[in-house]
C-alpha cells in the first residue's frame, strides 16, 4: 500500500468508527432520531398517528 491509500483508509475508518460510537453513546443515553420515546419531539404528531 502506498501512503495516500493508507491515509484515505484511516480517514474512512475514523469516520465510520465515529458514527458507530456516536450511535452507541446515543443508545446508552436514551437518545434517538425517532422510534420509541418521541413524546417530547415537536414533530411527533406527523410521525405517529394517535
Image (spheres, helix red, strand yellow):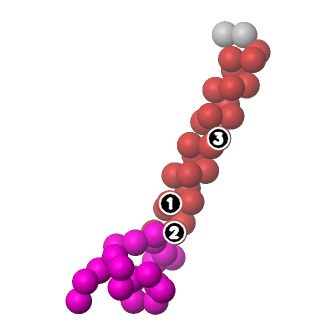
Can you identify the residue that label 3 sits on?
14
49 sits left or right of 14 in the view: left
Name the residue at 39% across, 89% down. Answer: 39
Find residue 50 and report its image quarter. Answer: bottom left
Q: Earlier in the sequence, mark 1 or mark 3?
A: 3
Can you identify the residue that label 2 sits on?
26
Let me know if residue 28 appears in the view. no
Front one among 1 and 15? 15
Which labelled disc corresponds to residue 23?
1
10 sits left or right of 31 in the view: right
Q: How far is mark 2 from mark 1, CA to CA?
A: 5 Å
22 sits left or right of 40 in the view: right
| Residues marked 2 and 1 touching at CB (< 8 Å) | yes
The kind of secondary structure the magenta stretch mainly shows is: loop
14 sits left or right of 47 in the view: right
Find residue 43 and report its image quarter. Answer: bottom left
In this rendering, the answer to whether 34 lies above or below 7 is below
Secondary structure state at the residue bearing disc 2: helix
Q: Residue furthest left?
A: 50
Q: How far is mark 1 from mark 3, CA to CA?
A: 14 Å
Residues in magenta?
29-50
Q: Residue furthest front?
A: 46
Name the residue at 50% across, 60% down. Answer: 23
The percent coordinates of residue 36 (x first, y second) are 33, 78
Q: Earlier in the sequence, mark 3 or mark 2?
A: 3
How many C-alpha atoms fall within 10 Å of the one at disc 3: few (<14), some, or many (≥20)?
A: few
Q: How far is mark 3 from mark 2, CA to CA?
A: 18 Å
| Residues marked 1 and 3 touching at CB (< 8 Å) | no
Amino acid at each position: 500500500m502506498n501512503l495516500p491509500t493508507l491515509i484515505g483508509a484511516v480517514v474512512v475508518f475514523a469516520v465510520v468508527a465515529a458514527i458507530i460510537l456516536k450511535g452507541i453513546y446515543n443508545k446508552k443515553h436514551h437518545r434517538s432520531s425517532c422510534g420509541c420515546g418521541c413524546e417530547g419531539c415537536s414533530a411527533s404528531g406527523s410521525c405517529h398517528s394517535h
